[in-house]
Image (tube, rainbow, N blue to C red):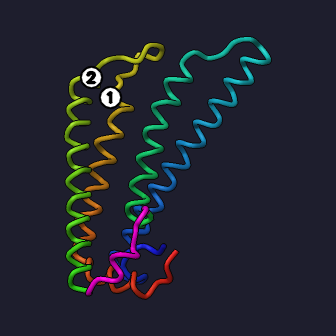
Amino acid sequence: MTGTRPRSGTRAAAGGDVVDRTLGALAALCLLVIVVMLFANACLRQLADMPLPWVEEVVTGLLLWLTMFGFVLGVRRHESIAVRTFVTKLPVRVAVGVRIVTELVTAAVLLHLAWFSLQYVVDFGGDATPYLRLPRGFFTAAIPVGAAAGALTVLARLTSARAVVLREREEPAG
């Protein structure tokens, strides 16, 4: 499924490409750090019987950030599960209305998640992790940041709802 990104060559497309590349690079960096840490920990455990006890807490925290980077990137590229079969049979005006309503509901759910996860970070983010004594908020902040970024991306897409519906009708299903 192709995304709803602006035509290439425009300033918005160039800015969007930078954001997408940055998100992809951050996700790749998280994944690389996770793999290296788990591999090193497994080697230390097998070869020297000296596992690093703090690896699990760092890996778990980085998985939150990796998930949110990937989530926002997927939302930006509009690479999410969509059922177009029903909507493509509707008149364009109705399909645009359905698109707007679903985007607004999606944004509302994401903002709700962002708000309550921010409250969690505020309440418990100062608690220290067991081994490294890092604030838990360093890791759990990924959830409100990712949810808010996803909501803002969805809301920004509302300006092009009609163009998206028309483009989706031209694309082959699947």
Relative horizontal placement of residue 142, taking residue 51 as reference (left or right): left
Q: How crowded is mark 2: few (under 14 residues within 10 Å), some or many (20 or more)?
A: some
Tell me where residue 131 appears, x and y as whole percent.
48, 14
| Residue found 26% across the figure and 82% down from its top | 162
Relative horizontal placement of residue 144, taking residue 61 as reference (left or right): left
Quadrant assignment, res 5: bottom left
| Residue found 40% across the figure and 66% down from its top | 82
**Residue most extreme to the right:** 47
Relative horizontal placement of residue 154, taking residue 48 as reference (left or right): left
Q: What residue type is labelled 2?
A: Phe
Tell me where residue 80 appears, x and y as whole percent.
42, 62
Q: How many marks?
A: 2
| Residue found 46% across the figure and 84% down from its top | 171
Quadrant assignment, res 121: top left
Q: How far apart are marks 2 and 1 (CA)?
A: 7 Å
Q: Which amino acid does label 1 sit on?
A: Gly
Q: How crowded is mark 1: few (under 14 residues within 10 Å), some or many (20 or more)?
A: many
Q: Name the residue under label 2.
A: 124
Q: Name the residue under label 1.
A: 137
Tell me where residue 154 appears, x and y as whole percent.
28, 63
Q: Which of marks 2 and 1 is nearer the N terminus?
A: 2
Q: In this view, does 99 lie above or below 144?
A: below
Q: Are marks 2 and 1 in contact (CB under 8 Å)?
A: yes
Frontmost residue, 5 versus 83: 83
Q: Is mark 1 on a helix, strand or loop?
A: helix
Q: Is residue 5 above or below residue 126?
A: below
Q: Where does the magenta region start and end?
A: 80-91
Between circles 2 and 1, the one closer to the viewer is: 2
